[in-house]
């Protein structure tokens, strides 16, 4: 897991995904493919359990961190494992805080 300085985001896409997560709406496969093509951040966000975590940047979690994103991410066992692994490897990051925000607080 690395920290990457820049990654592509689009506020309209983030708001759309937030809406879908809020109302548990499916995203059409074609549209999901187009969103995933925007970059690794969106590939991870759409399928956190299928993502290659060697490409993961823990700062992604803070981007557009709404209650609905949090609830969506909380479902991912792979994300939880990746964050725990990162906490073990490097105690100087904010991963402990991220972990607590996602998995320890009730919404």
Image: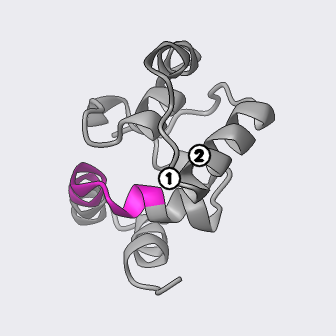
Give the numbered dot on residue 20: 2
Q: Is residue 50 above or below residue 35?
A: below
Task: Report the quarter where the N terminus lies.
Answer: top left
For label 2, count other residues whose C-alpha is less than 10 Å away and answer few (under 14), some (14-19) or many (20+).
some
Count of numbered marks: 2
Query: Residue 78 colored magenta?
Result: yes
Q: Whole-percent x and y of residue 48? A: 34, 42
Residue 102 is left or right of residue 17, and the answer is left
Look at the image and tell me whether residue 1 can be seen: yes
Work out whether residue 52 or residue 3 is closer to the camera in this orientation and state it: 52
Looking at the image, what colour scheme do you see? one colour
Residue at image coords 54%, 45%: 60
Residue 65, image quadrant: bottom right
Residue at image coords 23%, 50%: 78
Q: Is residue 106 above or below residue 88?
A: below
Residue at image coords 69%, 30%: 9
Q: Decide: marks 1, 2 in contact (CB < 8 A)?
A: yes
Q: Is residue 15 above or below residue 73?
A: above
Residue of label 1 = 24
Point out the stretch of residues depicted in magenta: 72-82
Look at the image and tell me whether residue 93 can be seen: no
> Which residue is outermost to the right?
12
Q: Whole-percent x and y of residue 15? A: 73, 43
Q: Whole-percent x and y of residue 28? A: 49, 23
Q: Whole-percent x and y of residue 105? A: 46, 85
Work out whether residue 21 or residue 49 is closer to the camera in this orientation and state it: 21
């Amino acid at each position: 897991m690395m920290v990457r300085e820049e990654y592509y985001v689009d506020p309209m896409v983030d708001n759309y995904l937030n809406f879908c997560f809020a109302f548990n709406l499916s995203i059409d496969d074609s549209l999901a493919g187009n969103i995933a093509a925007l970059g690794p951040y969106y590939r991870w966000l759409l399928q956190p359990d299928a993502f290659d975590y060697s490409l993961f940047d823990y700062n992604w979690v803070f981007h557009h961190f709404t209650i609905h994103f949090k609830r969506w991410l909380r479902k991912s066992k792979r994300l939880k494992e990746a964050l725990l692994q990162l906490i073990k490897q490097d105690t100087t990051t904010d991963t402990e805080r991220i972990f607590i925000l996602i998995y320890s607080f009730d919404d």
